[in-house]
Amino acid sequence: MKVLFLEVDLERSWSVASIGPACLAAYLRQHGHEALLMRVTADTPAEGITETIRAEGIGLIGVSLTTRQWLAARRILTALRHHITVPVVAGGLHPTYSPEETLAAPGIDYICLGEGEEALVGLADAIGADREVRDGDIPNIWAKGGVRPALAPPIEPLDALPPMARDLLDERDGVVHMVTQRGCPFPCTYCAARLYEEMYQDLGRYGRRRSVPAVIAELEAIREAGPLNYVIFLDDTFTLHRPWVLEFCKVFKERIGVGFSLHARAETMSPAMIEALAAAGCWHVTYGVESGSERVRREVMQRPVGNDRLIDVFRRTREAGILVTANYMMGVPGETRDDLDATLALHHALAPDDFGYFVFYPYPGTRLFHVCRERGYLPDDYLDRPASHRETILTLPGLSDDDICEYYDRWTDVRVASTLARLGPDCPEDVRKASIASVEASAALG
Ligand code: B12
Ligand code: SF4
């Protein structure tokens, strides 16, 4: 059976890294199926996609969906159904936490809840053998009109899975993506990633990590096959489990020795870990700060870390020679203008090398999603509207749309100012103008 993954590219090319499909394709191939990937946008004509599907003899289409990709995907798949009847299965965070709504889309026949490797092979086997997929036949696979399936336990150990099919990833110049873990144990109320822990709680531990030798062996194999110049670790929180991180740093430095970047939760960082990461070649860390108001972090986000601790971790990271990016959110329920001021103030105290700022969007299934629904902040037709980080979808008591727009623009001004400071006073005027235009264009995308 030949499976085609349709990857829905959004306006920013960096916003898709196809990790899910690359994991699934490797597992499909290991089990005797073929897999390829086609990148599409909301504007790709259905005829073009149909042509590929027919020419390649595709038997099953797989689509990996975040909420942000949902609207464009629905449009594409609905149009495609007018041309072909090849079955379509959607998986990923969005179908897992908006299952009924996803299955209701005209061009979607199945959804996959949670982990997809075994489920997708089961589905491809069944369709390839012309076997009807009945309720409950294939764990995790929910057929249109059927009932919610049981979940298979989390795959254990992760080392048993084949390495990602890198021909599906858009990797160049020896810059590669790696994922070493699944699951995050923290209770952040805005986060969709942590929901897997809840969904799988009766079936075993969802949080798992590949072993250090397996990660290093994959990197060595990549280097043997071509250049390896930099590694982007896409784990939710790379700095979980100190002993793992310290062992990794030691072996990575000895055997791999290239630069790398990662995402971390500041609360998990220790001075020893920062030193070890820097010594191993860690070049860049991204921390989610989210709010500068300790009250909002504690009461709304369930992140009771103090500002002093964040300031200390940022300082130590910078002093270790690691570039630091901070990410912030604005417009969560319960926030006020004072809280948004506190976030701007904390940003100046943290002094990161770079930062991202996002208007809060309540991803389905998260605790804050339920809060927004129960309190009437979220419109009923939310799934027909874009999941934007530029404008709020919510009607909040403490902040108006205009407030949020105003603060978003203030963040854009801060970015313009820091860009100009980096360019220095001698920078030619045309370069300054182009840089400002680029910051503003990026801000407009959200
Ligand atoms: C890596 C990553 C990125 C990468 C790549 C994203 C990508 N689409 O590949 C980058 C940095 C580009 C990115 C960007 C963004 N991301 Co991001 N990202 C992640 C992260 C940390 C890991 C995803 C991952 O690759 N996991 C490893 C793979 C193996 O797991 P998986 O994708 O879940 O796939 C498994 C199953 O879901 C299933 N499955 C997946 N697809 C399919 C398809 C089929 C057919 C089947 C059968 C099964 C199946 O099988 C897979 C293997 O078991 C997640 C957090 C998380 N833990 O999921 C956030 C996450 C997906 N990102 C998120 C967000 C919000 C964003 C941004 C909007 C951030 C921003 N403000 O700009 C952008 C936009 C992304 C987009 N295209 O929509 C949210 C999405 C919430 C939601 N409900 O949509 C998450 C969950 C973070 C969070 N904590 O809330 N992100
Ligand atoms: S630490 Fe990060 S990945 Fe983990 S629950 Fe919080 S926001 Fe999500």
Image: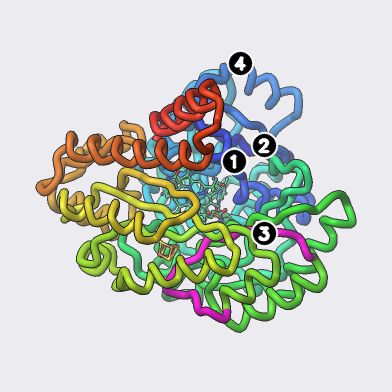
Distance from label 2 to label 1 (Cα)?
Answer: 6 Å
Q: Position of residue 109 (x, y in %)?
A: 50, 38
The region drawn magenta spans 257-272
Q: Which mark is residue 4?
A: 2
Distance from label 4 to label 1 (Cα)?
Answer: 18 Å
Element at badge 1? Answer: strand
Distance from label 3 to label 2 (Cα)?
Answer: 31 Å
- The residue at 69%/75% (across/down) is 248
Which residue occupies the extreme bottom position in the image?
A: 243
Asked if the residue at label 1 sits under 8 Å from ligand 1, the reply is yes
Please name the amino acid that badge 3 sits on: Phe
Q: Nearer the viewer, mark 3 or mark 1?
A: 3
Element at badge 4? Answer: helix
- Between residue 176 and residue 412, name the one nearer to us: 412
User: Is 446 on the left or on the right of 161, as rendered?
Assistant: left
Q: Which mark is residue 260?
A: 3
The residue singled out by tag 4 in the image is: 47
Please name the amino acid that badge 4 sits on: Glu
Q: Is there a contact, CB below 8 Å, between mark 2 and mark 1?
A: yes
- Between residue 112 and residue 279, name the one nearer to us: 279
Sequence-wise first label, 3 or 2: 2
Callout 4: few (<14), some (14-19), or many (20+) C-alpha neighbours within 10 Å? some
Please name the amino acid that badge 2 sits on: Leu
- The residue at 44%/49% (across/down) is 355
Please name the amino acid that badge 1 sits on: Gly
Sequence-wise first label, 3 or 1: 1
Distance from label 4 to label 3 (Cα)?
Answer: 41 Å
Callout 2: few (<14), some (14-19), or many (20+) C-alpha neighbours within 10 Å? many
Distance from label 3 to label 1 (Cα)?
Answer: 31 Å
Q: Position of residue 237 (x, y in %)?
A: 51, 66
Element at badge 3? Answer: strand
